Image: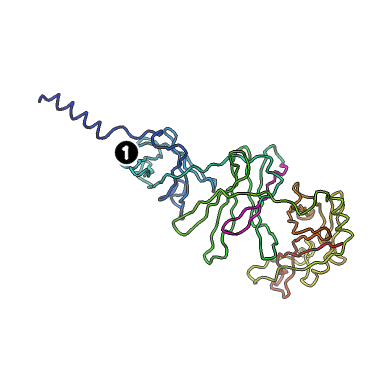
Amino acid sequence: MRTYEIFFLFGCLSLVACGPPDSPAEVMVPGKDYVLTEGKPLGYLQIGGSYAGFRLRIDRDTAHLFSPFHGHGERLPAYAGDSLATFGDPQYMVYDRRPDSSLVAVLRDSSGIIGRQRYELIDELATNPLAESATGKTYRFAIDGQAYYAYFEAPPTADAVQETRVQLYTLTDSSGRISRIAGGMGNRSAYASIPVYFPYRPDLTEGRRGVLLFSGDESGAPQVHMNYDGGADYTYLSGPYELTEQVSPLPEGIGARELVNLMNRSNITTELLTPEPAREALQYAYLEDFWRLGGIEAGEAGQLDFEFREEGGFTMFCGDRVLTRGSWSLSPDRNFFILSDETTQHRRHQFIDGYDGSTLTLTVPVRVKTKLPYGTELQSYYDGLAEVRFSR
């Protein structure tokens, strides 16, 4: 065999054996993402922790690594090849798809390999913008038997940017009382989803921190996924969970005027619900500030009184003392009293715990002085809740 024939045959065999590297179209599978199972994103190489659950998409010569739950995203040049391949970019990724559909990657800079990653194929997380019709409404859902409530609102802002906020509530005890545990917000023009950090299974000794991702389904109706830390090396994804619109306990004919008449002309009974916590959970303030901000002693909880005005003002008393003045309104879905304190400018949603035609039940926040003083120059106190019943 002549020399040029040997060369030609060897060249053809080399091309067949090596072949061209995977193109992005071959790497990405329709309806799938790559999920990080080993390694760290470029932006977290020097930080401890597990970053399993980050997702990778490759578009032509660019890798997009992102977390839909945590808001972090990074883009860098990406090339198909083995771990020895080098290119001229300051920082870049070289990836290799394996026969089992996994993908391994190395991160490089001018000094060499700076990180190694492994990915597995996973279904895309389908999130769409939330429909505007969801704002002003409360939805309930359950995770592992625990009931949660999500209230969506689009409050006015100082600029033209429109935000959607989520207030997250859960049942706090067997009485069915609901308390806020977390909240989150998103810019509608920039985000298709809203992450909300919350305590998932706080009863576990090691504790777990979860993230709920609220978004729209294909029609824009609310849906929620959950991501939570399952230990040192794993994170878990579940959902979407079904959200059911919460019906107000107030009948259709009950509005601001009827509520004002009920609350101002009824018998009021109040009960302090929150016991004094351990010393490490207390807060401190100058005594004059404590009284100015509406503080009470535990034994005064039964003296709470209220005056509501139809035009939207309210005053909260304790005996002859004014504790709070501000404004009130009903949420659009009439599941919440929205109370704004004129002193602190704090805006709070109070869930309507119940209404049976003659009694309206609310839970209101109170600052409570400790039985014993734990500060030297400052007054020790805690934030508590009081149940208020307005009965005809």
Main secondary-structure element of the magenta-colored stretch? strand
Is residue 155 rendered magenta in the image? yes
Question: Is 134 or 75 nearer to us in this picture?
Answer: 134
* Residue 264, horizontal then vertical, whole percent: 88, 58
Whether residue 388 sits left or right of residue 189 in the image: it is right
- Crowding at dot 1, Cα within 10 Å, few <14 / some 14-19 / many 20+, comes out as few
Q: Position of residue 294 (x, y in %)?
A: 79, 62
Q: Quadrant for residue 307, please give it.
A: bottom right
Residue 318: percent from left, percent from top:
83, 65
Residue 160 percent across, percent down from the top left? 69, 37
Residue 331 is left or right of residue 186, and the answer is: right
> With respect to residue 228, does 95 lie above or below?
above
Residue 79 or 390: which is nearer the viewer?
A: 390
Which quarter of the rendering shows the C terminus?
bottom right
Q: Amino acid at mark 1?
A: Ala
Q: Which residues are magenta?
A: 140-157
Q: How many marks?
A: 1
The N terminus sits in image quarter: top left
Q: Say if 234 sits above or below 85 in the image.
A: below
The residue located at (79%, 62%) in the rendering is 292
Q: Nearer the viewer, residue 280 or 383?
A: 383
Most extreme residue toward the bottom is 372
Horizontal side, residue 142 vs residue 270: left or right? left
**Residue 384 figure quarter:** bottom right
Q: Which residue is mark 1?
A: 85
